[in-house]
Amino acid sequence: MDNPVKGKFNFRNIIALLFVLGAIIQFMLTFYFNVFEAKEHLDIDASVEYLKTIVIGDRGGFFPQEFFHETSQPQIEKVFLISAPIYRLTGNVWLSYGLSTEIISILIILVLWFIASNIGLGFLERIIIVNLFLCPYLANGFNLDNNLSYYFCTNGWAAYYDVVALVFLMAIYILTLDELGFKNKIIAGISIAAMIYLCVSKGLGMLIWCGIPMLLYVLVKSLLKNDYKELISWKSIYIYSIVTSMLLGRLIGGLSGFTYFDSSKTWVRAGDFWGNLGNIYVGFKLLVGAIPGADIHRNPASLMGIVYVFGEVIFYVLLIAVIYAFINVINDIRNKSFTTDTDKRMLLLMIIIGNVFEYSLIDTKGNEGVFETRYLLLALLAAFVLAGDFIKSISDSLIFKQLGIVALLVSIGFMDLFSNYVLAISDNSSYKVDECLAVIEQTDAKLVYFWATEEEFTRTDRVIRVVDTSRVYKGISKGHYLQVFGDYTYYDDSKQYEGPTVVVISSDETNLPQDILEQYELLAEFDNISILYCKSNPIDLEKLTEWG
């Protein structure tokens, strides 16, 4: 007679092996794209992070404000510690930033693994969590203009929020421990120091994403247990320390002269409340590629449309896992069996519930009126861990579990495959960076202006300044507006430079001052782009602003 137990474990081992292979393949592909394809995929926002690496690598300092204009926040947490030092050694910004992103990804995977261990998950559940984290979820494709999807916030290229995710998960790791030993006290101290440093860079975002939800966890736990001691337990004291470090970091940043985007948020208006709440639900679906974006139209029966089916599978596994955890916590409270497992589930649930509650009250729409899904990133990471806990709780003997795991494996695998295909066929060639640079490099000009009465050259200017560090590139849009958002300060005063210059304009441009353009000779013309050269620098930005 066959041994059903042996068969059960063979199934787990085979599935676990497939998930391991999937994680290795996706990690290696992400490494390849980050290190070897960054230049071809660089967009406007990501170019700022790469440029910071170059400026800080060359000039030194924490955030050299005299050499670099701020954006919505300093955001130099990874640049200062990892990518800029590597850049000083290699002189290769693509390698340095790509390696820094991969280093952070490895650390996140390790912390996720230890969190899963803290809540008693087996190897299969842990490797599923790793796969959920590594998946790019690019069902909606690659957006060159402003890509803030899951992949580009965690694992891909700029990876704007990877350090945020790491520091958050370090805190979750500490809070899922049963006891705080000596080694973990050191890790707790490091996480508190890291939170101060992070909030100097990021502002009060962390307070909303995890600080307030953690405080709610302490409050709810003390009320449920009806015990004041919970307010002064070691976990509560750690949370108070974490929240204090967030405020301290923001204070240090403010005193240092940094500005932050957090000061521009507003409460949602009464008429927008239900729409904002619905956007949160849609936001989670967008993060995992379970629904088309606002401007995307695809046939469900097509290859490009069927990918959303796999995104839906992933989304509903996460949703069911969160609901399951919520029901379990409620049942434990009713039965007065508040165990350490209950405590850990409630912590992760409060991260999710807290974010949903907060963002139902705060207007988080971007410039185009679309909900900014990246703010739900930490809640999604908490849902990944709860998915592993949900899978572990189901008996291996149930066909439901076996089919469910296979469906999840296929869904993540197909999403990985589709996402990598999207990245492989996408690039920024429409910016004409290589074509412009080929002409510019034939000149002796060290200052290049991209000048337009509209803003069509902003993209090319943003990317080419990272590709070519031997010259200074300045973007002038709307005829007279110097693009300084996330740019270096070199030659902001154009009178500081008196050598040869190049001007790149639209071939059909007629609204720029002719007395300046007449001093330039045409070098090349292609794709409605004209590249002009002058042996001097006739452009005075101060007078140009007055002209505008």
Image (cartoon, grey):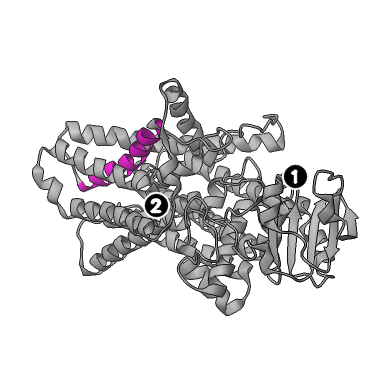
Pick the residue in front: 438 or 39. Answer: 438
What's the residue at 21%, 48% (across, down)?
A: 340
Which numbered dot is residue 453?
1
Give the percent coordinates (x, y) of residue 111.
Answer: 38, 60
* Nearer to us: label 2 or label 1: 1
Answer above or below: position of 517 versus 83.
above
The residue range painted magenta reads: 340-360
Instruction: Indicate the quadrant where residue 24 lies.
Output: bottom right
What's the residue at 60%, 77% (across, down)?
A: 90
Give the percent coordinates (x, y) of residue 207.
Answer: 34, 47
Pick the residue in front: 151 or 148. Answer: 148
Instruction: Give amino acid for label 1.
Output: Thr
Taken as a whole, is the magenta stretch helix, strand or loop?
Answer: helix
Answer above or below: position of 366 versus 515.
above
Give the percent coordinates (x, y) of residue 546.
Answer: 67, 48
Image-based side of 433 in relation to 121, left or right: right
Answer above or below: position of 364 versus 537.
above
